[in-house]
Amino acid sequence: MTQEKLLGWKELPRGGSILKPGNSESRYTGDWRTFKPVILQDKCTRCLRCWIVCPEPAIYVIDEPYTTKSGRQFKFSVEVNYDYCKGCGMCVEECEPKAIDWIEEEK
Amino acid sequence: MESMLKATWKRLPLSTNFAIAQAVKDSDVDVVSAYPITPQTTVVERISEFIANGELKAEMIHVESEHSAMSAAIGASALGARAFTATASQGLELMHELLHIASGLRLPIVMSVAARALSAPISIWGDYTDVMNVRDTSWITLIASTAQEAYDSVIQAYRIAEDPRVFLPVIVAYDGYAMSHTYEPVYVSEKSDAFKDYIPKNPQWYTLNPEKPLTMGSMASPEWYYEFKYQQVVAMKNAFGVVKEADEEYGKRYERKYGIIEEEGVDGSDVTFVTYGGIYGTLKESIEELRKKGEQIGLARIRLFRPFPSEIVADLAEKTKALVVLDRAITFGVNISGPVAREIISSLYARGIERNVYSFIIGVGQRTVTEKDIAAIYGKVKEMLGSHERQKESIYWGVRE
């Protein structure tokens, strides 16, 4: 069900069936968060454990080279899509180099 | 017309259970899932014989409980199959949560219920407590009073359920034992494809198909759920007209029809008896005797319990002076405890019709009701009418002190 417009009973498909596949894209679960994960690009080793464990998935691999302050070069970056990140904290828990901060959402 | 009847029908001695099985065969059902329970069992036994000897091409799914029987019927219907199951009593109770799912998913399943009392104490005998208990599950509910009507109603039920204005499941109920296990002459179709045009196979409800993927059984959060329930309210309202149409059309094609309420001699009567199911036969006999003594008594039988025919009941009440409602079930903890009596009272209230409605509980757990009982109930009602007594609570007829 899309979140853009609350449809009336006449417009909705019978019995709660969803007629278009791929509809979870329109369900923005980002507003469930009370804490948010923030990836520290300089500490991140690009192991992609967070990418594996994220249930949403809201960890995106971005085609953007990055050089850390210590001079280490990576061909890509890792980012969180906050439209969909529910704030479950699994990435924070699993991050070996402790490269994800866990910050309380501002009110 | 008589010759056409002869050409099309064969007259068989059938119990209502066997009449139901015959109707399932003649409806060309695709999937039957069932679990045995008295007094329903011979319905699905006979169906499995039809399947085994090749008279019906269908899948018979033997399941481990009624909960699974309804689940399998839901799955089959969700794939576009014409699905059937049968149950009674505890079996219907075990299905209960699935009944809401079948109707909520808007699947046109048809189920027969040989109405039976509920445990405890254990009773395998008939009354309508099981049927009345599922009245809020959004299943259309027809109650037959003869084996012939049960046969015709199952065929009509597929026409009703599969109508795009409805897409709701249908129960065809009838008396456990008094009907399920007694034999009557029943006209059944000579050819199994006689109803092909009346109930064509053309599933238009949402079905699971990999070519055209969709999600069924999704979750609805508070801002969505209510609208889906309202869709069911509307479908139930539509069902009322569709039940009528299906019956009319059946009458045109096959020369038998039943209406929503069967009534007789109501106009200008002093008292009208209202009931449902097989007990109507006993009632008819008794009233005929009373009429011979000059009593002005009307008779009515509710054939459609859900959606409840409130308007027709109100019309009926306007033609008579008082109503006596005979219920074979108890709604515990309320003063008027006959389930149908309560529906009738609220129908009259909505139309502002002032009539005395007398609620009697009879035939619970197959307690015998004879013509003498009916005559005595009539005597009691006359007494109350004479003293302008309004009934404060249902009368539990024949219960021992």
Image (tube, coloured by chain):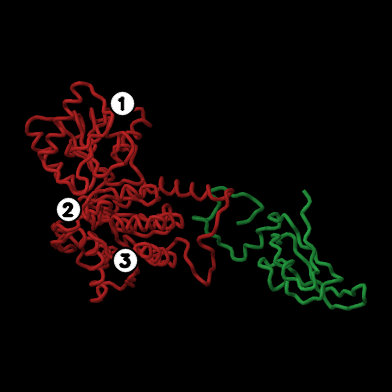
Instruction: Please name the residue that numbered disc 1 is placed on.
Output: B354
The span from disc 1 to disc 3 (Cα, nearest Å) is 46 Å
Please, what secondary structure does the residue beneath circle 2 have?
loop
Say few, some or many: other residues with alpha carbon within 10 Å of mark 1 (under 14 / 14 to 19 / 20 or more): few
Three-letter residue code for mark 3: Ala
Seen at 37% across and 60% down, the residue is: B109
Q: Position of residue B306 (x, y in %)?
A: 35, 47
- Give the chain letter at badge 1: B
Question: Outermost residue, top direction?
Answer: B387
What is the quadrant of the N terminus of chain B in the image? Answer: bottom left
What x and y, as percent, mark residue B225? 54, 50
Q: Secondary structure at mark 3?
A: strand
Element at badge 1? loop
B82 in relation to B399, above or below: below
Tell which subunit mark 2 falls on: B
Q: How many marks?
A: 3
Of all chains in the rendering, the one displayed in green is A
Q: Which chain is red?
A: B
Are the numbered discs 3 and 2 placed on the same chain, yes or no?
A: yes
Q: Check disc 2: other Cα within 10 Å, few if <14, some if 14-19, many if 20+.
A: many
Where does residue B233 sit, x and y in percent of width and height? 44, 46
Looking at the image, tell me whether mark 1 or mark 3 is earlier in sequence order: 3
Left or right, B149 with respect to A16, comes to left
Which circle, 2 or 1, is nearer the viewer?
A: 2
Q: Which mark is residue B178?
A: 2
Residue type at numbered disc 2: Ala
First reached walking from the N terminus: tag 2 or tag 1: 2
Q: In 3D space, how far apart are the residues under numbered discs 2 and 1 (Cα atoms)?
A: 35 Å
Q: Earlier in the sequence, mark 3 or mark 2?
A: 3
